[in-house]
Image (tube, grey):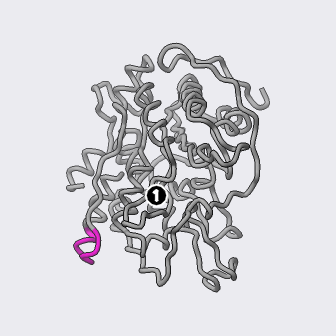
């Protein structure tokens, strides 16, 4: 039986229709990088916080999940919006909800993978990529380290990638268009948060590479050629204005819920009570961008490596057993593509 990769999160990984072009979610691009018996179920939706998702959508997703399935937990892009009281989730509550997501998934036999939010198109006047996600990426990394859960630091990896591309080119990865540039947006659209199809594809490569580095996907599961093909460097934008990136956020629904009362469970990855059921690599990007650099002389290679918080060995130690996809050797992936990538100099 095929394994399934579930994508949980907000509008950035969420699937998009043709009517929403040029916007695309990185979650919808994962399937194109897979070749093995792995399916993708994109459960990400716009305007979702950890709190809202946990109460409204998580039980249905958990009801569908099978033992051995992979669940990407990609929240933080909406939770941090302190200016919007209906969406804001304070860091302590955000961390507790991440613990609950991971514990429920693990208790049902799934493999939880925390994914920090994708960086926005935002640069300082001095040229550095700006972290507009506040303390939430760090807060997620802390939870991953505490639980020994796998984690992909997508914030850090995309900030590095954006820095290499630079502000004059990066706009071509986002759903930011000038007037007359796109038929669905004749007056133009300013959006520094949501990706277009090319940007979503590149972020999906980082995520799938991260799953390989963690040993959760192996060589038979992925299209190695697609992962290792150098990306096309975006063209230079004739105009680009990236001041006040927060003003460029677009969400489909003005929604929110009252705070969910939660308490810190004792122990590490302790099994929670059964929830209600409905009806009852950056390493590859290193090689790719190094190739672009050699061809254009314009960008430098991106540092490889994905934070794994101990990866499978730490998951095993913290959770009390070894999750599917890990071998009996401490820290070693089962038939992982990590060694294959390294053997190719990635």
**What residue lies at 49% left-to-right and 73% top-to-bottom?**
172
Could you say where residue 335 lies in the image, as x and y percent from the top left? 32, 39
- Residue named by callout 1: 203
Q: Is residue 297 magenta?
A: yes
What is the total number of numbered labels drawn onto the structure image?
1
Residue 17 shows up from this direction: yes
Q: Is residue 67 magenta?
A: no
Q: Is residue 119 left or right of residue 252?
A: left
CA neighbours of label 1 inside 10 A, class few (<14), some (14 to 19), many (20+): many
Q: Is residue 265 left or right of residue 204?
A: right
| Residue extending farthest right | 279
**What residue lies at 33% left-to-right and 58% top-to-bottom?**
285
Residue 226 shows up from this direction: no
Q: Is residue 242 left or right of residue 163?
A: right
In this rendering, the answer to whether 268 lies above or below 5 is above
**In which quadrant will I find the N terminus?**
top right
| Residue extending farthest front | 125
**What residue lies at 25% left-to-right and 45% top-to-bottom?**
339
**What residue lies at 46% left-to-right and 80% top-to-bottom?**
237
- Label 1: which secondary element: helix
**In which quadrant will I find the C terminus?**
bottom left
Could you say where residue 84 lies in the image, as x and y percent from the top left? 69, 48
Could you say where residue 198 lies in the image, as x and y percent from the top left? 49, 68
Could you say where residue 297 lies in the image, as x and y percent from the top left? 24, 76
State which region is magenta.
Answer: 291-299
């Amino acid at each position: 039986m095929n394994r399934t990769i579930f994508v949980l999160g907000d509008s950035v990984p969420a699937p998009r229709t043709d009517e929403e072009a040029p916007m695309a979610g990185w979650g919808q691009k994962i399937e194109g990088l897979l070749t093995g018996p792995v399916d993708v179920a994109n459960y990400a939706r716009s305007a979702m916080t950890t709190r809202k998702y946990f109460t409204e959508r998580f039980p249905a997703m958990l009801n569908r999940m099978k033992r051995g399935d992979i669940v990407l937990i990609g929240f933080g892009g909406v939770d941090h919006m302190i200016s919007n009281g209906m969406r804001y989730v304070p860091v302590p509550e955000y961390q507790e909800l991440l613990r609950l997501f991971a514990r429920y998934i693990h208790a049902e036999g799934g493999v939880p993978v925390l994914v920090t939010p994708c960086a926005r198109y935002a640069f300082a006047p001095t040229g550095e990529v700006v972290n507009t996600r506040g303390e939430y990426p760090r807060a997620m990394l802390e939870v991953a380290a505490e639980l020994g859960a796998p984690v992909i630091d997508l914030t850090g990896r995309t900030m590095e990638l954006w820095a290499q591309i630079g502000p004059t080119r990066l706009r071509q990865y986002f759903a930011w268009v000038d007037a007359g540039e796109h038929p669905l947006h004749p007056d133009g659209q300013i959006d520094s948060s949501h990706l277009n199809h090319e940007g979503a594809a590149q972020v999906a490569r980082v995520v799938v590479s991260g799953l390989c580095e963690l040993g959760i996907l192996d060589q038979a599961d992925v299209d190695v050629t697609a992962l290792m093909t150098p990306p096309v460097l975006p063209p230079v934008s004739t105009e680009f204005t990236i001041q006040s990136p927060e003003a460029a956020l677009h969400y489909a629904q003005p929604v929110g819920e009252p705070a969910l009362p939660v308490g810190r469970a004792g122990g590490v990855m302790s099994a929670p009570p059964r929830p209600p059921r409905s009806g009852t690599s950056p390493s590859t990007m290193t090689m790719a961008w190094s190739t672009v650099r050699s061809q254009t002389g314009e960008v430098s290679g991106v540092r490889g490596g994905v934070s794994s918080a101990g990866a499978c060995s730490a998951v095993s130690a913290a959770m009390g057993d070894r999750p599917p996809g890990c071998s009996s050797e401490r820290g070693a992936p089962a038939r992982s593509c990590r060694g294959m990538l390294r053997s190719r100099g990635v």
